[in-house]
């Protein structure tokens, strides 16, 4: 009788724990961060990596960059998110800048650092810094081009089938003339099939 009661208690505890909320409690590093990630139907790092790689290749092959006598100075403004998803567009532009700068064919003006630079100029002009090492207004280099873009999506769902289409467009605009000298886009379509989830 005791064995029956013990078995029943163990089964009850097992049932209660299996019905409760689940948490991810054990993990490991994925050494290949460029491996395909399709855990769900949302924007992923794989999408970002594929888009950036192709767009950078397109940009550096264009005469505005490839044929320049010196590396053009570029300022990245923003990447508009025209999707219904929360997408970290700053991560996309950051990766784009890193990959583009690593080609050695482009240098960037850091728009985000302007406030810090102005603050440092003020400090260096306060008398706390030696004249020999002081930096001040009038020495910065102006950008030649502005780079911006947008990301859009189209989702289609029929029955158990779903397709998610993304398009990222990047533009390079001459700051002096206002003319767009390069534009490139990357298209991606992912296909998903809905399955029942349960016991």
Image (cartoon, rainbow, N blue to C red):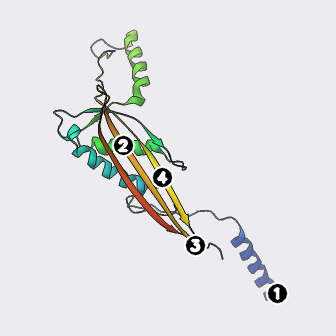
| Mark closer to the observer (1, 3) | 3
Q: Which residue sits at x=41%, y=19%?
A: 118
**Sequence-earlier tag: 1 or 2:** 1
The residue that mark 4 highlights is 153
Relative to 163, 106 lies left or right: left
Q: Can residue 48 be seen in this view?
A: yes
The residue that mark 2 highlights is 170
Q: Nearer the viewer, residue 117 or 192?
A: 192
| Mark closer to the observer (3, 4) | 4
**Sequence-earlier tag: 1 or 3:** 1
Cα separation between marks 2 and 3: 36 Å
Secondary structure of the residue carrying tag 1 is helix
Q: Can residue 42 be seen in this view?
A: no
Secondary structure of the residue carrying tag 4 is strand
Q: Do the residues labelled 1 and 2 touch (CB within 8 Å)?
A: no
Cα separation between marks 1 and 2: 72 Å
| Mark closer to the observer (2, 3) | 2
Q: In which quarter of the image is the C terminus?
A: bottom right
**Sequence-earlier tag: 3 or 4:** 4
Above or below, 130 against 25 in this view is above
Q: Which residue sits at x=40%, y=10%?
A: 126
Q: Do the residues labelled 3 and 4 touch (CB within 8 Å)?
A: no
Q: Quadrant of the N terminus?
A: bottom right
Above or below, 186 against 18 in this view is above
Q: Residues within 10 Å of mark 4 (few under 14, many from 20)?
A: some
Relative to 28, 180 lies left or right: left
The residue that mark 1 highlights is 2
Q: Find residue 107 and report its horizontal and vertical position in percent.
A: 27, 34
Cα separation between marks 1 and 4: 62 Å
**Sequence-earlier tag: 2 or 4:** 4
The residue that mark 3 highlights is 195
Q: Are marks 2 and 4 in contact (CB under 8 Å)?
A: no
């Amino acid at each position: 009788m005791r064995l029956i009661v013990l078995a029943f208690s163990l089964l009850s505890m097992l049932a209660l724990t299996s019905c409760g909320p689940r948490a991810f409690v054990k993990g490991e590093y994925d050494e290949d961060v460029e491996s395909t990630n399709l855990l769900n139907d949302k924007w992923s790092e794989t999408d970002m990596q594929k888009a950036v790689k192709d767009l950078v290749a397109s940009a550096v092959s264009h005469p505005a960059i490839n044929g320049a006598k010196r590396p053009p100075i570029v300022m990245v403004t923003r990447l508009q998110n025209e999707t219904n998803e929360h997408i970290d567009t700053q991560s996309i532009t950051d990766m784009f800048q890193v990959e583009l700068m690593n080609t050695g064919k482009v240098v960037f003006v850091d728009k985000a650092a302007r406030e810090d630079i102005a603050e440092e100029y003020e400090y260096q002009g306060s008398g706390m810094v030696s004249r020999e090492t002081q930096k001040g207004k009038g020495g910065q280099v102006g950008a030649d081009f502005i780079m911006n873009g947008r990301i859009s999506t189209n989702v289609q769902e029929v029955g158990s089938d779903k397709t998610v289409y993304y398009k990222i467009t990047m533009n390079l605009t001459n700051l002096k003339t206002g003319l767009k000298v390069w534009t490139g886009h990357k298209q991606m379509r992912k296909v998903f099939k809905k399955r029942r989830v349960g016991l």
